[in-house]
Image: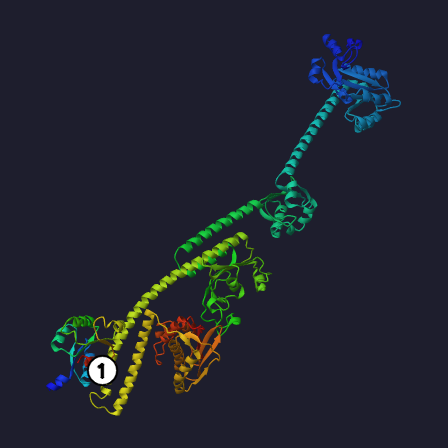
Amino acid sequence: MGKIKSTLKKILVIDDEGDLLELTRTRLEVSGYKVLTLDSGARALEVAKCEKPDLILLDVVMPGKNGCDVCRDLKADAATRGIPVIIFTARYPEEEYLKIGFREVGADDYVLKPFDAQALLAKIKFLTHQNS
Amino acid sequence: MGLIKTGNYDVAFLDVNMPELSGIEISRYVKDNNINTKIVYLTGYPCVNEMLAKELGADEYLRKPVDLKVIGDIVDKELRILIVEDSPLDAELIARELTEGGLDYTSKWVKSKDEFLRALVEHAPAIILCDYNMPDFGAQEALKIKKESFPKIPLIVVSGTIGEDLAVNTIKLGAVDYILKDRLGRLVMAVRRALEETKIASESEQLRTELIQAKEVQLAHFQKAMANSTDAIGMLTPDGRHYYQNEAFTKLFGFSVSETEAALRSPATIYVDEKVGRSIFDTIMRGDAWTGEVKMFTKDKRIVDISLRAYPIKDNNGNILGLVGIHTDITERKRWEIEREKTLKWQLHTNMLRQALLVSGRLEHKLNIITESVVRIFDADFCRIWLIRPGDLCEKGCIHAKNKIGPHVCRFRDKCLHLMSSSGRYTHIDGKNHARVPFGCYKIGLVAAGLEHKFLTNDVVNDPRVHNHEWARELGLMSFAGYQLKVPGGEVIGVLALFAKHPILASEDALLDNLSTTTAFVVQQAAAAEEMVRSKVIQSTSEMKSKFAAMVSHELRSPLGAIKEGINLVEEGLVGNINNKQKNLLDIAKNNLDRLERLINNVLDFQKIEARGMEFDIRENDINEVVSEVASAMGMLADKKKLDFTVNLCGNVPKSAFDKDRVNQVVTNLVNNAIKFTESGNVSIGTMVENNTLHVVVQDTGRGIRREDILRLFQPFEQIDNLMDKKKGGSGLGLAISKDIIEAHKGKIWAESEFGKGSVFHFTLPIKERRG
């Protein structure tokens, strides 16, 4: 089991919409990933430090602390700086900003909701391979 | 001198200037010696006057040559009696009777006709006493002579008994009395009475003469006053004979007396209003006076305003002897009155106009005030304001007929003149053939298109530049004026035009010209104000719509994503095996989710274009190529609906610079719509080249579009509620996006449609060389 554990990439998904969070978890799990979920950005840094995920999938528009701020915090902390982050949103005009602005907040890539599952998986695969 | 010394003379006539002894010396002697003789100087010296003569001792003086009658008057201070008697005894008896009766007299006794005649002249008797019967003469003959030559000298017949008949006869012949010789006692009394009567008669005659003279003087004064009057005075008899007119009358009317009489026979030649003329005559002939103001013609047919006082001239019994008319020329005064009234009216209306234009209000309202004011100030028959506005579509049966290029489209559609305001005879601004006039057509269109900034004619009925003379004649129109409404930049934005029944004067023309400039300014201001309000509204609604669209799209997209992902997971068999039937059903669900997503994306697309504008990739392209690509892509869709789909490409289409993908998007949209809304018949697409423009036409035999909808067809969002066919799907933004794309290329896009029969969509692109 331990071997399996070590081979499975661990992904932290942070989204305030529970339904979508559940679907994303399913999609990632059937694609061979270990998935952790959070329904807000408040505990993101703490969980990331503790669990050390291989990648973080982060929604931008959330009540409380938004995705952009969470991302900045992650990239500012030496312990979490190395974890690749994909941020996503469904809201205009935030998504327009995201296309050019994702690097500014330190994210490694972006996706638009609703996801094209294959495109998302390709990006995850690329970022986790490079990191490993 | 010796004669005078005797003192036997009553009067001495003395020549003043005589050799040896002068008249002056003689008169001095007379006065010094108290001789009772009256001295009368006779002199030729002009220096001698009455006063000098009296000083020199004369009682009177006469200038030579001397009037004998005057001498008679001077001598005739005493009673001279002429006695005509053949018997010396009787003559002596008579003389004694007279003396005894106390008369102070001198007498002359004659006994024949010859002596009688001479005595009448020389003796100048005051009274004649005449015997009735003498051998060669008689009282009858004496009376006859006296009556002819000296009718005023009384004659008393003194005679023996002659019988009563003869006596009465002598009285009839002119004798004042008859005295019998045997009754001479009555003589003195008779003489006295006769003299008294003569004196009274003479005095009364003198009095009458004086009276007549005074009246003549008065009359002369009246005549002079009338002749010199500045009022024109004319008089005529009741039967129409014009017998008097003064100089002022001749001067004012120009008629001679006979011409006036001739003119008066038909009042229409003198009175502008014949009826008034007749009523004036009727009033006077009834015996009343007529006073008032009346318009009259002069001989040279000038119209003059007259203040007329006309009276009948009546005798004491009220019979009308004549008519008198006193005419005062008040033309000038009247003209000033009218002028003043006009000025006041003008001031009033211009003040109203200014106030109305200054306050804020709707443009239509202001234009109405302008046309209304023109009608009132300039007494126009009607006045209209036309503004140049794009005429999206022409009405069916529109007078543009000649200028049509499509079924309903005029080639002046961008410069169509729309009737905005109408006052006076016509007040409607809608209705066929009146609401619009194409640029360059008819008077209004010509004025708008003309090089001259105005068109003015005071003879519309005959002016060859004006059509429809018959209409103008029927309405009695005389003048037309049209003014371009020009904004300061020089652009013509419309026309102000008026028709009037009187000539438009140069001064009025200048004012109207001025007013048209003001009107242009008002229109411009109003347009600017409206634009500001509109852009504010658009801005705020646009912002609101943006937010709304963003919110809606997000809210739709999130659950949509969730549904889609769920279905995907199941369908892909990642969470358990599914059979084919289940997979098919999930496919249907997925397809419809894709469609819904496209729809939402379309909304977001448009939102992006609105917010940021579009970027274009302009390259040299072939429009036929684009149309062919779309045709082959959409052909299948048409086949599916069993529609006849035809493509008519124009040969020889030059290449032109445009964004191929964007134009493809437009053509696709138009063809897609055509197929979507056509249930049977055909859909066709064609290309044309005209006037350096590419023209693409997409035609269908679908259900068509209502006229009221056609104007809003290209406006974003408007048609989402109204036009989108729920069954057919589509965001309805396709045409708005197409419009943005075509207009960004400086082309035009429009639609024509007859509801129930089909639609035609056009767009044009200017042919441009490749840039750079």
Residue B334, horizontal then vertical, whole percent: 55, 46
Residue in the picture at 67% in, 32% down: B217
* Quarter of the image with the C terminus of chain A in it: bottom left
The quadrant in which residue B598 appears is bottom left
Eyeballing the image, is B216 above or below B593? Answer: above
Please state the horizontal and vertical placement of residue B300, each as a whole percent of the image.
65, 49
Q: Nearer the viewer, residue B2 or B483?
A: B483
Residue B694 position (above or below residue B211): below
Which color mode does the image show?
rainbow
Q: Indicate the position of residue B365 as horizontal and vertical percent values.
A: 42, 60
**In the image, what residue type sits under mark 1?**
Leu
Q: Which quadrant does the N terminus of chain A fall into?
A: bottom left
Q: Is residue A42 visible?
A: yes
Circle 1 packing at 10 Å, graded few (<14), some (14-19), many (20+), is: some
- In the displayed structure, A36 sits above or below B126; it is below
Q: Which residue is mark 1?
A: A121
- Residue A49, percent from left and from top: 12, 75
Q: Does any portion of residue B314 appear in the rendered image? A: no
- Residue at the spot 48% in from the left edge and 49% down from the top edge: B344
* Chain of the residue displaying label 1: A
User: Is residue B589 left or right of B633 when viewed as pictured?
Assistant: left
Most distant residue in the left direction: A2
Residue lying farthest to the top in this orientation: B33
Q: Is residue B485 left or right of residue B150?
A: left
Left or right: B9 in relation to B440: right
Report the side of B477 relative to B316 (left or right).
Answer: left
Element carrying mark 1: helix
Is B500 in front, or is B3? B500
Q: Nearer the viewer, residue B331 or B30?
A: B331
